[in-house]
Amino acid sequence: MLDVKFSYSSDTGVFNIEGGCYAKCIGLDPFKEPEIFQAVRFGSVLENVRFRDPISREVDYNDTSITQNTRVSYPLDFIPGAKLPAVGGHPKNIIFLTCDANGVLPPISKLNSVQAMYHFISGYTANMAGVVAGDEGTSATFSACFGEAFLPRHPILYAELLEQKIKKHNTNVWLLNTGWINGKYGVGSVR
């Protein structure tokens, strides 16, 4: 899974302040994710991985002895065809992803600006069974602005800025439930 982290908004559009990517690398396979696999080279940074061979530094992408949360970060120009510089206009659509383990959210919702602020501030999703070692169940979790640990200022400030941008640029906001509907985890269905 590829995350182009921390997109920011300015008066001229959105941009990637890091100039790079941050990807999960557990089970990384050169056939399933060739671009990411090829990006792991001099200049990339690996987190929480073990080497198959410390001399050749061949990485064992299936080793979970440290954690399942192994990551790699690398510059955008390590990806063929990346848009450089990483600057774009204002989005026509914003999609909030949430995994609802309680089955109360619909599969997809179009939000008005007030609803978008609410969901942005609450940052609702679920910790899923098996994601955390020893965790057998699911639980609701909340992270303001879907990234609370990274916020230097109060979440309301970011939500108000989001509302201003949504209104100014007539942006559609969608809430996409990647979890369960018509019942909680183990009862409902995944769509």
Image (tube, rainbow, N blue to C red):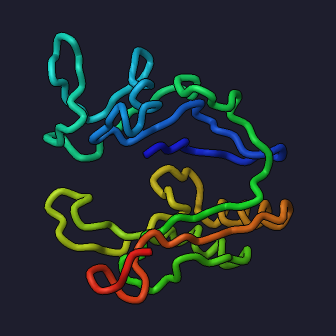
Q: Residue at x 35, y 38 (%)?
A: 71
Residue at the extreme front of the image, as rendered: 31
Vertical placement of residue 40 versus 155, above or below: above
Vertical placement of residue 95 versus 183, above or below: above
Q: Viewer-proximal residue, 163 or 89?
A: 89
Q: To which quarter of the image does residue 111 belong?
A: bottom right
Locate residue 17 relative to residue 136 in the image: left or right.
right
Locate residue 82 relative to residue 89 in the image: left or right.
left
Residue 66 position within the rendered picture, expressed as x and y whole percent measured from the top left:
17, 40
Q: Viewer-proximal residue, 10 or 24?
A: 24
Residue at the extreme top of the image, as rendered: 55
Q: Residue at x 74, y 67 (%)?
A: 172
User: What is the number of callouts on the image?
Assistant: 0
Locate residue 51 relative to residue 148 in the image: left or right.
left
Quadrant containing the C terminus in the rendered view = bottom left
Residue 152 position within the rendered picture, expressed as x and y whole percent measured from the top left:
55, 50
Vertical placement of residue 97 versus 113, above or below: above
Q: Residue at x 75, y 54 (%)?
A: 91
Q: To which quarter of the image does residue 174 belong?
A: bottom right
Locate residue 53 relative to residue 125 in the image: left or right.
left
Residue 84 position within the rendered picture, expressed as x and y whole percent measured from the top left:
69, 27
Q: Residue at x 45, y 69 (%)?
A: 178
Q: To which quarter of the image does residue 73 belong?
A: top left
Residue at the extreme right of the image, as rendered: 168
Residue 148 position within the rendered picture, expressed as x and y whole percent measured from the top left:
49, 58
